[in-house]
Image (tube, grey):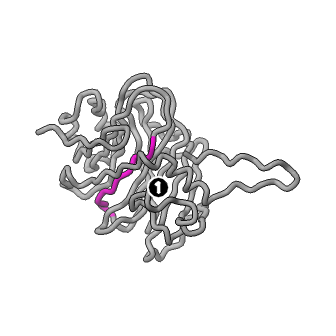
């Protein structure tokens, strides 16, 4: 789920990357193009184990690799029609105060539970009635990214977190952009995942796959997010669909 502390004008070209990390954790990277009239926060509820401590999320600075998702998209070239000029590739679907971490061009915090939001700067908290709008997230933790107003493409927000269900990769695809949770929503997303070498189940229908990632991703600049010796899978979500988070068995 992606929600904002204040209304936004538009959100588009959302990209999300997920991969298993060690010790039951998960890598997650999130990027989008955002237009907002005032400073606000983006809030990602995370399915973490109950009583997860506030230092359990590790933020990863990818500000030096703003093209992270552009490079991943190179693993999925667009077909060129015979007898026509090459088409341009589509853009990638694209108590005490809590600790605040400088992560590239924004600040980030991990909020262990809904009751801990009052420890954040008031400008970046969820609305007072948010708990009632987030059914199923009573035990979630929350990654909070403080963003500046204006229209811009947000460089990848990346981190690792402990998973309540280590056998599945989590994509926060529910979105609340106007303060309301709608049963359906408009999607402009590309989901990317790398599966565990131990994965036994088939990849769900609709996912494409690439060559090994090292052929198109700068593994050093990705700072451990990507396994260069594994392919990446992609799923595009376009148009109206059920407004829900997505889990992929891993």
Image quarter of the N terminus: top left
Closest to the observer, 166 or 101: 101
Question: Would you say residue 123 is visible in this rendering?
Answer: yes
Seen as rendered, the residue at the extreme right is: 83
Taking the magenta stretch, the answer to whether it contains residue 159 is: yes
Say left or right for 126 vs 63.
left
Residue at horizontal 18 percent and vertical 53 percent from the top: 53
Q: Nearer the viewer, residue 60 or 180?
A: 60
Task: Please state which of residues 72 and 96 is positioned toward the viewer in this rendering.
Answer: 72
Q: Quadrant of the C terminus?
A: bottom left
Q: Position of residue 110 (x, y in %)?
A: 26, 46
Image coords of residue 216 (percent x, y):
57, 61
Q: Is residue 244 visible?
A: no
Task: Determine if the magenta segment contains residue 117.
Answer: no
Q: Residue at x 32, y 63 (%)?
A: 25
| Residue at figure coordinates x 60%, y 60% from the top left | 75
For the magenta stretch, what is the residue range? 155-165
Q: Name the dominant secondary structure of the magenta segment.
A: strand
Q: Residue at x 48, y 46 (%)?
A: 66
- Kind of element beneath mark 1: strand
Residue placed under numbered mark 1 in the picture: 17
Relative horizontal placement of residue 200, taking residue 59 as reference (left or right)? right
x and y percent of residue 234 in the render?
56, 58
Position of residue 209 relative to residue 136, above or below, is below
Q: Residue furthest left?
A: 95
Given residues 128 and 236, the one toward you in this image is 236
Characterize the local packing of mark 1: few (<14), some (14-19) or many (20 or more) Cα atoms within 10 angstroms: many
Total labels drawn:
1
């Amino acid at each position: 789920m992606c929600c904002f502390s204040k209304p936004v004008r538009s959100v588009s070209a959302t990209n999300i990357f997920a991969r298993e990390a060690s010790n039951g954790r998960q890598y997650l990277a999130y990027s989008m193009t955002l237009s907002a009239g005032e400073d606000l926060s983006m809030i990602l509820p995370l399915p973490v184990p109950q009583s997860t401590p506030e230092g359990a999320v590790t933020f990863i600075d990818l500000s030096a690799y703003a093209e992270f998702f552009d490079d991943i998209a190179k693993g999925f070239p667009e077909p060129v029609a015979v007898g026509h000029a090459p088409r341009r590739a589509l853009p990638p679907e694209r108590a005490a105060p809590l600790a605040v971490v400088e992560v590239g061009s924004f600040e980030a915090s991990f909020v262990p539970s809904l009751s801990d939001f009052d420890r954040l700067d008031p400008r970046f908290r969820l609305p007072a009635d948010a708990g009632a709008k987030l059914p199923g997230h009573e035990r979630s933790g929350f990654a909070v990214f403080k963003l500046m107003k204006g229209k811009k493409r947000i460089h990848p927000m990346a981190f690792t977190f402990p998973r309540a269900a280590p056998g599945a990769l989590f994509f926060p695809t529910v979105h609340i952009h106007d303060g309301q949770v709608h049963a359906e929503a408009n999607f402009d997303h590309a989901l990317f995942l790398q599966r565990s070498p131990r994965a036994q189940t088939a990849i769900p229908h609709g996912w494409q796959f690439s060559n090994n990632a090292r052929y198109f991703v700068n593994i050093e600049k990705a700072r451990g997010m990507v396994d260069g010796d594994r392919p990446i899978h992609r799923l595009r979500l376009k148009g109206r669909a059920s407004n829900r988070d997505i889990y992929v068995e891993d």
